[in-house]
Every structure is written in C-alpha cells, then in structure tokens.
Image: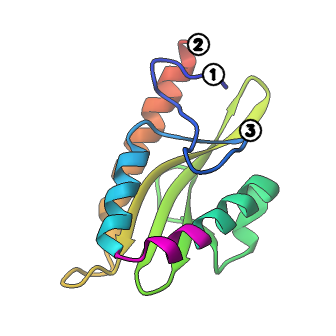
Amino acid sequence: MRVTDKKVVYPAAFNSNLIREHPDYENDLKKVIEKSGARAKFLGLYMQRLKFLDDERELCSQRTKWFELLKHADGDLYAMRLDFEKNIRILFAFVDYAGTQYAILLYPFQEKESGKTKGSYKAATPVALKRLNYIREGLKDV
C-alpha cells in the first residue's frame, strides 16, 4: 500500500509491512500517552500488541485480553486493549488493498477517564468509522 495524499501512513514506532495508520492517529496517540503519564509502560505494551497483530492478523481477537472485535460498531472495528494504570484502547480495522490485508490504526482513546463513564467507546467509535471511510474512499482513487 502506498501513501496517497497522506491517507495512510506507517506507524512511526513500529516497522511492519501490514500495519498502517490514519494520518491523524499519531498526534492523537501522543496526546493520549502524555495524558496517561505512563509512557514507558505504554510503549512496552504497545510494541507487544503491534507485534502480535502483525503476526496474527484477524486472529488477534482470539487473545481476548489484548484485542476484541467490537460487536455493536457499524463496521468491522477492533479494539487493541492496553490495560495498566490507564486503560488505553486503540480502534482499528482491516482493509484489503491490491490483494493484501492491512491493519489500519484509526483512533486511540483512554477508557474510563476519571469523571467520565465507560461510554468512551460510544464517543470513539464514530471517529474511527469516519476515519475508516476516509481511507476507503482514498483507496478507491488509487
């Protein structure tokens, strides 16, 4: 998959042939990490999850403590779970392009932020779906 008008980019912290991210993902992730105050802990878990996702693809959801297929999302969204002092979630989807399946990291967020309800998925899912549609539309033009 090539970069087209910056619709899909490579994750800066991980070298993979099959994992990409939405152009706004990296900035959102930086904000979530800064807010968490646990950069080192997050980074170790994140690299572990990315490696597993890269190796297992859609079978990643069989490791239920790390990944889940979102049942109530209008689309095929998955969540990467990073549970420690802060519960960080990364919504992603699989997209087929030129005969290859790519995992596209769409939107990170912190679940169960203090003063907020567990409904963080409710706010994050529409953002992730909008980003997924943006990427799919961009790939049609390639």
Magenta region, residue range: 37-44
Foreground of the two, 22 or 29: 29
Residue denoted by label 2: 142
Foreground of the two, 54 or 137: 54
Q: Which of marks 1 and 3 is nearer the N terminus?
A: 1
Give percent across and percent down for residue 141. Answer: 53, 12
Contact between marks 1 and 2 (CB within 8 A): the answer is yes
Q: Distance between the residues labelled 1 and 3?
A: 11 Å
Residue denoted by label 1: 2
| Residue 40 magenta-highlighted | yes
Q: Report helix, strand or loop for mark 3.
A: loop
Which corner quadrant of the image does residue 19 belong to? top right
Three-letter code for the amino acid on which mark 3 is drawn: Asn
Give percent across and percent down for residue 50. Answer: 66, 59
Dot 1: few (<14), some (14–19), or many (≥20) neighbours within 10 Å? few
- Horizontally, residue 26 falls left or right of residue 19, namely left
- Horizontally, residue 131 falls left or right of residue 53, namely left
Q: Which of marks 2 and 3 is nearer the N terminus?
A: 3
Which corner quadrant of the image does residue 17 belong to? top right
Three-letter code for the amino acid on which mark 1 is drawn: Arg
Residue that sits furthest to the top in the current view: 141
| Image quadrant where one finds the N terminus | top right
Residue denoted by label 3: 17
Position of residue 124 relative to residue 3, above or below, is below
Q: Which residue is drawn at 73% across and 75% down?
A: 63
Q: Report helix, strand or loop for mark 2.
A: loop
Q: Distance between the residues labelled 2 and 3?
A: 19 Å
Position of residue 132 relative to residue 57, above or below, is above
Residue 24 is marked as none
Which corner quadrant of the image does residue 70 belong to? bottom right
Give percent across and percent down for residue 108. Answer: 42, 59
Give percent across and percent down for residue 82. Answer: 53, 74
